[in-house]
Amino acid sequence: MSPRTNCDLTLALALRPGHTVGMSDLFVDADAYDRFMGRFSSLLAAPFVEFAGVGSPGGLAPAVAAPARVLDVGCGTGMLTRELVARGLTVAAVDPSEPLVSAVRASLPGVDARVAGAQRLPFADGVFDGALAQLVVNFLPDPAAGVREMARVTRPGGVLAANVWDFAGGRGPLGVFEQARRETDPSAATEEQAAGAAEGYLASLFTAAGLADVRTAALTVSRTFASFDEWWTPFTLGVGPAGAYVASLSPAARASLRGRAESLAGPGPFTVEAVAWAVAGTVRA
């Protein structure tokens, strides 16, 4: 059986207005996740690390270059973790999914991977030079508490960084799907209504947490699909609200949604761009 990954790392948390996150929201099949959202979030790790300025003596955070110790908060399938390791950093990672943490330990034996949530990190104060969270913070039950906890375990002068897809701006990786859903089912809630998906949201959390030198950037990634079916099939795997929505449709409604999406995207090949808002800041002394 494949490991299962927490949806803090996906847009598969329940983003529906008024929805309370439950255990059914927190775990999806890791293989399905990789086919659905991993095909985009895997591309985000490298530009995110570059933006944060860690892992390079010439980066914006030269004190967080190898062999500095950094924490990947909500490591999920380990996409960001691998990027940090590849840059020679000493990496710890946390995720609430025990099977997934076991998988990260197996694939990255040098990583201190632990089962833990972002709001109660199992580390002493100031033990990391940096803490990064990819597609995590805005999905936490208490995002402000999560940022404060990241700051607690990071030393003064260390770097915090986080990102989120620009759902609110309509530039997330599901843009074509969401447009097709709006047009075929105007009453359906969309990822674009997600709290925390707008420009400035993460920056406001960092500022409220007392971080210094808060800066933001829009990070763009793109993936080319050889055919419409290559793009569409992962939506049928039941991952997150989008997958649950597709699964809930009658055959006729599903065919209507698929047909409208194909008319928007074309038969392929075609390229999908996705934009994420990234924020970074420095822990004050």
Image: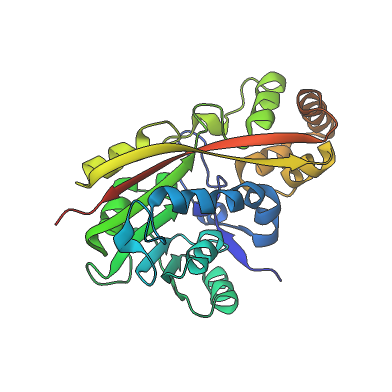
How far across and down, in percent of the image, does residue 24 sit? 57, 54
Q: Could you say which is closer to the camera, residue 198 or residue 63? A: 63
Percent position (x, y) of residue 266?
82, 27
Residue 135 visible (yes or no): no
> Which residue occupies the extreme left position in the image?
285
Q: Position of residue 206 (x, y in %)?
A: 28, 44
How many numbered marks appear? 0
Residue placed most toward the observer, 109 or 102? 109
Pick whichever, 96 or 152, lies toward us: 152
In this view of the protein, which residue sits in the foreground, 145 or 110? 110
How far from the left and from the top, in percent, is residue 91? 42, 70
Which residue is pictured at 64% across the width and 20% down the height? 186
Q: Quadrant of residue 65?
A: bottom left
Residue drawn 39% across the image and 69% down it: 66
Q: Residue at x 61, y 27 (%)?
A: 188
Is the C terminus in the top left, top right, bottom left or bottom right quadrant? bottom left
